[in-house]
Image (cartoon, rainbow, N blue to C red):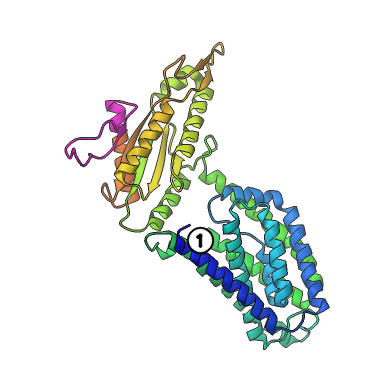
Amino acid sequence: MPPRVIAWVLSWEVIFGACVALSAWREPSTAGTQWLLGLVLLAGATIHHLTTKPDEERRFGARAGGEHIELTSLWLFPAAVLLPTVPMIALLIVVKTQRYGIARTSVTKHGFTSVAVGLSMLATHWVTLAVTGGHWLTPTSVSSTAGHVAVLFAAVAGIGVYYMVQSVLLPAVRVLSSDRWPPLITLLGTPTQNAEILGSLTLAALIALGTAWSPWLLLLALPLAIAATVLLELLANVRVQVMYDPKTGLLNTHGWSPTASSAIQLAGPGRPTSVLMVDVDHLKQLNSRFGHLGADTILVAIAEVLRESIRPGDISARWGGDEFVVLLPGATAEDARGVAERLRTTVETLRLRVTTPAGGEELTLGVDADPVTITIGVAVAPMDGSSLEVVLDVADQRMMIGKVDSRNRVYAAPAPNQPGEMDSAV
């Protein structure tokens, strides 16, 4: 992490600790009924976690390296509305410790996201106190219509506060990690992510309202939480099927284009962004000789090379039958040529064992048969165009020139020392 990001994270962790201590000090001692309610919420959260653990692991895996919307707010938000500070924070610690067992993230990141959730809970808790005049909103003390109305207003206000605190703390890390101020729309997350967040908070507010009216309604919260998790898993599976190529596991055109556009926006205006258009040389001949299974083996191997050879943050996809595309955010022309040449040489040195359809003869490409090779076209924004579509088209044109001219090459923009020539071989 850059020093400014470390300072931001550590500062808010210190602030969180101070706020917890101050809030707990100003409140009266926690009653037994409040601890009992906290234990009931913890039991529900634990059963929810254990029941939906495989679904959540798959969702974490599908968004490894990206944002993951948890449903812990279904238990933490009611705690912020209904419990004093001490049992509320105790519930947070236990729940987030449970979640770390399946979280595909570092301790540092998980700790800071937990602090962000904790600050959201504290802010919601303080809003609840302000709306209700300081009366504890536990099932034993909310018995009048006025009490229920107070809980309703506290829950509605809490949704906004809970959402806004995390919308400031977490995106700020992305801002501080970047050299330029990213567009605001990229900081707020995708519409799908925001819909998931607000939907889970709305359900959590309903659980808080029901619990304030009768603690027995918490029995309904568990099946609702499990159903919501299963629904999100089904939606995640649908998105995977729509956005990913089933053969190679890379993004397809539907998944790459919006992901690439978001990456360019996040990089900021004026920064160079490169595109590589990759074509497998003579795939039709390979398909004729080795059959569909042999050709699929080659495509899967090239996809694996893309995954292992590109830089963190680069975005690769299968563009068509024998074509792949790679976006290199922040990469200059020189950087892109270096990545492209590394891809080309790595593919050329692959030693794949494939079986021919007739007779089942096993051959090793690069030993018993010609090696697999690729031709790559390189384009760079803003030099080659101001939009992703234009840069992509330029990269495709250069790749096509390579297929006609001489395959197994990298074709890029004219080098600075050769303004009138095409860089036909890097």
Identified by mark 1, the residue type is Pro
Q: Main secondary structure of the magenta part?
A: loop
Which quadrant holds residue 222?
bottom right
Q: Position of residue 166 (x, y in %)?
A: 55, 68
Q: Nearer the viewer, residue 266 or 284?
A: 266
- Number of residue marks: 1
Please check the rendered image and state whether residue 406 is part of the magenta-colored stretch, yes or no. Answer: yes
Q: Nearer the viewer, residue 17 or 147?
A: 17
Query: Tag 1's secondary structure?
Result: helix
Please check the rendered image and state whether residue 308 is part of the magenta-colored stretch, yes or no. Answer: no
Q: Is residue 133 left or right of residue 113?
A: right
Vertical arrangement, residue 373 with respect to residue 223, above or below: above
Q: Is residue 397 left or right of residue 299?
A: left
Residue at 73% x, 76% y is: 83
Vertical arrangement, residue 248 with respect to residue 127, above or below: above
Which quadrant holds residue 81?
bottom right
Residue at 79% x, 63% y is: 43
Residue at 69% x, 65% y is: 93
Can residue 187 be seen here? no
Badge 1, how many Cα within 10 Å: few under 14, some, many 20+?
few
Q: Position of residue 230 (x, y in %)?
A: 68, 53
Q: Is residue 419 left or right of residue 49?
A: left
Q: Position of residue 200 (x, y in %)?
A: 63, 64
Can residue 385 be seen here? yes
On-image quarter of the C terminus: top left
The residue beneath circle 1 is 191
Vertical arrangement, residue 95 with respect to residue 370, above or below: below
**Magenta-highlighted residues:** 400-426
Q: Position of residue 392 (x, y in %)?
A: 34, 44
